[in-house]
Image (cartoon, coloured by chain):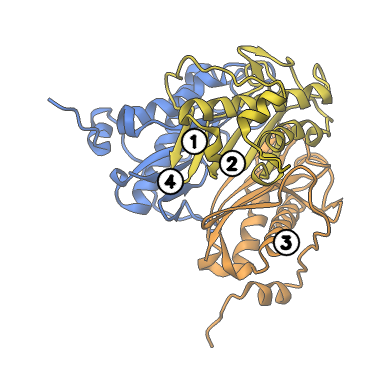
Chain colours: A yellow, B blue, C orange
Amino acid sequence: MTTVFDPYTRLAELGLELPSWKSRYEWFERTHQVGDLLFTSGQVSTIGTEPVATGRLGAEVTVEEGYASARQAMLNVLGLIHDDTGDLRLWRPARITIYGAVAPDFTALGQSATGASQLLVDVFGPVYGAHARTAVTMPNPANGAAIEVDAIFHRR
Amino acid sequence: MTTVFDPYTRLAELGLELPSWKSRYEWFERTHQVGDLLFTSGQVSTIGTEPVATGRLGAEVTVEEGYASARQAMLNVLGLIHDDTGDLRLWRPARITIYGAVAPDFTALGQSATGASQLLVDVFGPVYGAHARTAVTMPNPANGAAIEVDAIFHRR
Amino acid sequence: MTTVFDPYTRLAELGLELPSWKSRYEWFERTHQVGDLLFTSGQVSTIGTEPVATGRLGAEVTVEEGYASARQAMLNVLGLIHDDTGDLRLWRPARITIYGAVAPDFTALGQSATGASQLLVDVFGPVYGAHARTAVTMPNPANGAAIEVDAIFHRR
């Protein structure tokens, strides 16, 4: 049997629920489409308003918690796209940028960042989930959360 | 009467003057167009070469000064676009990235970043000024200034 | 005689060798194409796995070493593009982002970042090598290296 990576089926199989975005931001958009490109606003690693892990990688937050944080931040990005466009199946990732709040000397951001990349492959499959990525460090958590992610998606 | 958001009229009404860019950078461009997209180089929160506020948010720079800094950095972006393309009315923002230099424990970057978002809405109106955005922290000021902004605009 | 900036001829004249990318990343792509745009994954300033200079600008790494680091990180980006698309001559830079790991009070990132910009002009020439750019600071080195660069290229 051929596996078809329908993102909604995959999310259900993974036991993941897309966040529901009841309210819009006051000053900016959650996503902005230009032709075949879809730019998303930065999303932090929170479930609702609660950070998956509070603080900086290498201090209050472990590499594993950072992985879970990156996965959640990316799930929040998918929630934005679903909510704004109505259909995740129209889209695939082009490039994602992962910003990790870090303590001095923390050097394992790549391992944590892979939580975001893995979610895309889990949900969209190895072909349509493939993406370029950049992972960089920042000094302070974003709304308390260790990871912030933004993305450029494009038409599938 | 219908309000038409002509960016030049709005800038005049807001008492804002576009910076005049006399000189080009030596090593890179101020803007780069690809089809309907216009990428801008990062702009810092200076009036001429003088920072709106010198230092880091949460230390030498207050949230309110950060707001004014983000607004000025975005005004500088608009100056680049006007200067390179000759007509701001051809363009609208797609995504902006706001980098804020912060002291440890500063958590209110979003409030300062809104200075950049608000300027876009003030100048282009709520429809054409709408944009996706990401705000992230960085350790050091950019040429002494608290805020740096870059942007992707697209054809209106 | 008219100078034609063939990137391969220029690389040879400059004594530069494109890195050979034997292996793919496990979780993400090195480049991702969307129509005329080519997004690259972030590249650090290493020759193979060895950083050009280890540590942060303004502490363990000088401005000049930072310049060499930015140049090398950009050379690695060109290696990715050659390897994935088979022909550097099809592409030109649109915007690059340079992330520099810095010590507190280091203020000369722009000088180091110019290593990346200069390489593009050296290899593609002043017309096709022209690009928008953003340079921002980050707290920690990327895999030990002082500079990380990502880029958006487009069809020449």
| CB under 8 Å between discs 4 and 2 | no
Dot 1 crowding, Cα within 10 Å, few <14, some 14–19, many 20+: many
Cα separation, mark 1 vs mark 2, equals 21 Å
Report crowding for label 3: few under 14, some 14 to 19, many 20 or more residues within 10 A (C-alpha): some
Q: Residue at the spot x=67%, y=77% of the render?
A: C9
Is residue B123 visible to the viewer in this orientation of the structure? no
Which of the two residues, C44 or A69, is positioned nearer the viewer here? Answer: A69
Q: Which mark is residue C29?
A: none
- For mark 4, what is the residue? A35
Q: Specify the farthest residue to the right.
A: C50
Residue B74 in which image quadrant: top left
Helix, strand or loop status at disc 1 = strand
- Dots 1, 4 in contact, CB < 8 A: no
Seen in the picture, residue C151 relative to A79 is either above or below; the reply is below
Q: SS class of the residue under badge 4?
A: loop
SS type, badge 2: strand
- The numbered mark at residue C79 is 3
Residue where numbered disc 2 is placed? A92
Are discs 3 and 1 both within one chain?
Answer: no
Name the image quarter holding the C terminus of chain B.
top left
Chain hosting mark 3: C
Q: Nearer the viewer, mark 1 or mark 4?
A: 4
Q: Amino acid at mark 3?
A: Gly
Q: Report how far apart the C-alphas of labels 4 and 2 lie in the structure.
A: 14 Å
Q: Local crowd at mark 2 within 10 Å, few (<14), some, or many (≥20)?
A: many
Say which residue appears at 41% left-offset and 38% top-offset: B93
Q: Are marks 3 and 4 on the same chain?
A: no
Q: Give the percent coordinates (x, y) of residue A83.
A: 49, 25
